[in-house]
């Protein structure tokens, strides 16, 4: 009865993850309209814009390159890419549907058939190899018009536009696709309200009230998608998706411990609590007060709360790249340069070339924390090391650093399974090199598959297998036994 589980369960979903805007390209082909992601330049300015410190819709400016416009040309090469995923033995493939391929302006009533036909073909290609599609309905790809004309997610009209979009794709694909997620990294609006909620400075991204109102509208939209999906087929598995960062207090100082507790409650748990438990956590009032949000300024109806309560998610999808350290005593420096979600440096950890603190044990902790709290199946839908790869003269790419990172994280997963956690799958991020969300660059690579394309957009776009490709193939073949 109390046997320790030492192995990954049968049917474990090994695979990889991408997002439409970061790899498809063909940004204005097949009737597709522009999305927020298409307006983000490559290079230094990108992070400031994504963070919404500045934004002025320079979509047509010659001054910038827009790496997402071409992506890695996956729109035209998806068959070759899926074939390579199949060669690695993928059991599943997580990708997103570009909203503006289906509703180019976001607010139309009739979907764009050419866009749907692209995903028909993509899904069928996965199924041809017995690869289970895992779809993110919205991954940082809000149709641009919904940001510009409606002010992004703070506007309630977006609920009905999303509902229409979700309805169209769920209805069309529910018989072929079992696993879904409603919003990518919904809690990331703490740091990236532009990408996550389509809020820009002119629509008040710097006012936390707008972020909270946007979250509420997204929670209602997410609950509607769960409702539509379950009405179509009660067996559909529809999850939330949060950006999880294990968080430590710097020391035993109770002041830091309490600050860290709040960091966990607000960043890691607030959105998940609403989507998994179906109600706002008791910490909401305190969080709003700390961010100077007047609760009476929020539009939240009883009907919304009922919808949220009745349509909770089936599993918890989350991304995990790093941990953070909380120190409010200001005794340990200004913060770690580059760590995506801030905090001070952890003396026990190394960082990636982009300053993200690498912490495999933190993943085991994250899995335990999430399972303790929610008792729902967990799905790690993003994890990985962004690194610069070197192509040798013979074309080989010896990415032992990537193998090392993934190996340690898979060991941590195995540890969590032995701890009793119910883990259903693992889809490392950017299984094929793609455009980085935070830098817009190609040189921050995550893939098992190398794509010949540089930061200036030059290259043949040829695909090749890195050492990690052969390694991951073995991991999948042995169901996580051979690392
Ligand atoms: C997550 C996003 C992805 C992805 C990943 C890696 O936050 O969901 O879209 O890009 O981070 O980030 P980056 O590309 O900035 O290295």
Image: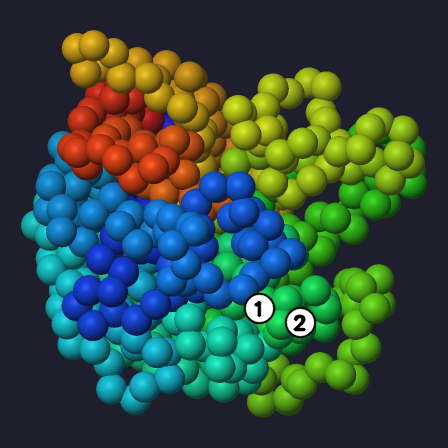
Above or below — where is 183 with respect to 33?
A: above
Label 2 sits on residue: 204
Residue 124: image location, x then y, percent: 11, 57
Which mark, by number, is residue 145? none
Q: Are marks 1 and 2 in contact (CB under 8 Å)?
A: yes
Question: Ligand 1: does it lie within 8 Å of the C-beta at label 1?
Answer: no
* Measured Cα–Cα span from mark 1 to mark 2: 7 Å
Question: Ligand 1: does it lie within 8 Å of the C-beta at label 2?
Answer: no
Q: How is the image coloured?
A: rainbow
Quarter location, residue 246: top right
Quarter location, residue 112: bottom left
Give the camera-side residue of 424 and 353: 353
Residue at x 22%, y 57% (from the top left corner): 26
Residue 439: image location, x then y, percent: 48, 41
Label 1 sits on residue: 199
Residue 293: image location, x then y, percent: 79, 72
Q: Quadrant of the C terminus?
A: top left
């Amino acid at each position: 009865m109390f046997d320790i589980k030492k192995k990954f369960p049968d049917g474990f979903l090994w695979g990889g993850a991408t997002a439409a805007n970061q790899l498809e390209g063909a940004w204005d082909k097949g009737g597709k309209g522009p999305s927020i992601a298409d307006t983000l330049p490559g290079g230094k300015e990108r992070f400031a814009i994504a963070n919404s410190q500045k934004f002025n819709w320079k979509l047509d400016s010659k001054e910038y390159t827009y790496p997402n416009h071409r992506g890695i040309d996956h729109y035209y090469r998806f068959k070759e890419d899926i074939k390579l995923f199949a060669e690695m033995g993928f059991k599943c493939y997580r990708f997103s549907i570009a909203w503006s391929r289906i509703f180019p302006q976001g607010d139309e009533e009739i979907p764009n058939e050419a866009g749907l036909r692209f995903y028909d073909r993509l899904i069928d290609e996965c199924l041809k190899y017995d690869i289970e599609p895992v779809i993110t309905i919205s991954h940082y790809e809000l149709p641009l018009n919904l940001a510009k004309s409606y002010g992004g997610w703070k506007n309630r009209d977006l609920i009905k536009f999303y509902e229409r979009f979700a309805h169209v794709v769920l209805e069309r694909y529910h018989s072929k696709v079992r696993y879904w997620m409603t919003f990518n990294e919904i809690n990331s609006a703490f740091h990236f309200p532009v990408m996550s909620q389509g809020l820009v400075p002119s629509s008040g991204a710097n006012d936390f009230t707008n972020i909270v109102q946007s979250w509420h509208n997204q929670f209602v939209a997410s609950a509607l998608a769960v409702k539509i999906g379950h009405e179509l087929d009660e067996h559909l598995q529809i999850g939330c998706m949060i950006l999880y960062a294990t968080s430590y207090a710097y020391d035993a100082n109770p002041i830091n411990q309490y600050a860290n507790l709040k960091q966990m409650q607000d960043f890691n748990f607030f959105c998940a609590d609403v989507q998994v438990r179906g109600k706002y956590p008791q910490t909401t009032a305190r969080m709003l007060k700390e961010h100077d949000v007047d609760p009476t300024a929020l539009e939240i109806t009883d009907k919304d709360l009922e919808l949220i309560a009745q349509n909770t998610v089936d599993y918890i999808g989350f991304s995990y790249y790093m941990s953070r350290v909380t120190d409010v005593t200001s005794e340990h420096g200004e913060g770690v340069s580059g760590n995506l979600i801030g905090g001070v440096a952890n003396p026990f950890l190394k960082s990636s070339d982009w300053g993200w603190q690498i912490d495999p044990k933190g993943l085991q902790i994250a899995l335990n924390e999430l399972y303790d709290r929610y008792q729902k199946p967990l799905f790690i839908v993003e994890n990985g090391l962004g690194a610069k790869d070197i192509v040798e003269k013979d074309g080989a790419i010896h990415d032992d650093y990537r193998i090392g990172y993934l190996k340690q994280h898979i060991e941590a997963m195995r540890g969590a399974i032995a701890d009793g956690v119910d883990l259903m799958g693992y889809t490392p991020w950017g299984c094929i090199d793609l455009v980085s969300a935070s830098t817009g660059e190609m040189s921050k690579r995550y893939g098992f598959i190398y794509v010949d394309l540089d930061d200036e957009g030059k290259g043949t776009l040829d695909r090749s297998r890195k050492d990690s490709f052969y390694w991951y193939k073995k991991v999948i073949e042995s169901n996580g036994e051979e690392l």
